[in-house]
Image (cartoon, helix red, strand yellow):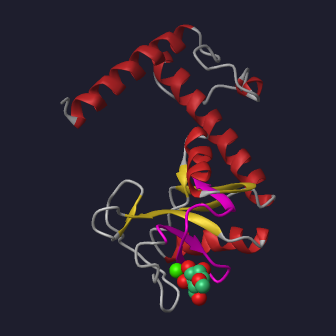
């Protein structure tokens, strides 16, 4: 297996190659054709930076960062996303069984909402309240041990079980969030709000 540092070295090498190309075409060459790309075009270069290579990359990153800030602000304003630390929570507004909800999240490049602390739990709870629908979480009961784990199989490091839960005794292998943010183990074939994290 390649070591982590060799992946970083590879990434840095790729960046240097990209930046070198950018220094020859210091506008937006190398960016995929995405909506809103045009705003990145023709913006003034950041003054006082040494070297054309540095300038091209830095300028691109400053513009991308600004565009990301705008998009996050707009989405958060409309209640489309909840941001907690590194995570972004969002729903498609649709109800689905556990497997379909997980698939939707993964196809969108994320996974099912998985609260790892009180703050993340509250962000998910806000969406549950907003849509007035319970939601499945990215937690499952392990086939073998009967323990609840993350979808990755790792043991839970934070829990918010409702009083007397989990009580399914192996018959409720998924977990839903109630409107007060507490958790209930529940059958996996019901229709619950799809909330993903990215
Ligand atoms: C339902 C079901 C269970 C839950 C209990 C709580 C009757 O079963 O949602 O998962 O534990 O209600 O009363
Ligand atoms: Ca239960």
Residue displayed at 49% across by 10% down: 21
Residue 179 belongs to magenta span: yes
Residue 92 x %, y %: 73, 52
Is 13 situated left or right of 45 in this image? Answer: left
Q: Quadrant of residue 183?
A: bottom right
Residue 104 x %, y %: 62, 45
Picture layout, residue 4 above or below residue 176: above
Residue displayed at 48% across by 85% down: 165
Q: Number of labelled discs?
A: 0
Q: Which quarter of the figure is the N terminus placed in? A: top left
Residue located farthest toward the right when viewing the structure as drawn? 78
Residue located farthest toward the front when viewing the structure as drawn? 171
Residue located farthest toward the top when viewing the structure as drawn? 24
Residue 94 x %, y %: 75, 55
Is 128 situated left or right of 55 in this image? Answer: right
Picture layout, residue 73 above or below residue 167: above
Is 129 situated left or right of 88 in this image? Answer: right
**Residue 47 visible from this viewpoint:** no
Is 58 situated left or right of 37 in this image? Answer: left
| Observer-nearest of 192 and 180 | 192
| Observer-nearest of 175 and 18 | 175
Residue 84 belongs to magenta span: no
Picture layout, residue 124 above or below residue 77: below
For the record, the magenta segment spans 172-198
Residue displayed at 70% across by 71% down: 128
Residue 196 x %, y %: 60, 54
């Amino acid at each position: 297996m390649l070591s982590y540092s060799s992946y970083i070295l590879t990434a840095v090498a790729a960046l240097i190659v990209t930046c070198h190309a950018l220094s020859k075409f210091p506008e937006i060459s190398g960016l995929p054709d995405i909506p809103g790309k045009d705003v990145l075009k023709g913006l003034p270069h950041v003054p006082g930076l040494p070297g054309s290579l540095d300038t091209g990359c830095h300028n691109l990153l400053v513009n991308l960062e600004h565009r990301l800030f705008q998009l996050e602000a707009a989405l958060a304003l409309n209640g489309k996303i909840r941001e907690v630390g590194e995570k972004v929570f969002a729903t498609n507004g649709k109800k689905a069984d556990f497997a379909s909800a997980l698939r939707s999240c993964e196809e969108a490049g994320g996974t099912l909402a998985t609260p790892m602390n009180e703050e993340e739990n509250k962000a998910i709870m806000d969406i549950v309240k907003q849509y007035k629908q319970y939601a499945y979480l990215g937690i499952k009961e392990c086939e073998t041990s009967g323990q609840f784990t993350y979808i990755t199989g790792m043991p839970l490091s934070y829990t918010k079980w409702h009083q007397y839960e989990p009580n399914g005794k192996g018959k409720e292998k998924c977990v839903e969030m109630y409107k007060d943010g507490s958790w209930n183990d529940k059958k996996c074939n019901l229709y619950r709000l799809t909330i993903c994290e990215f």
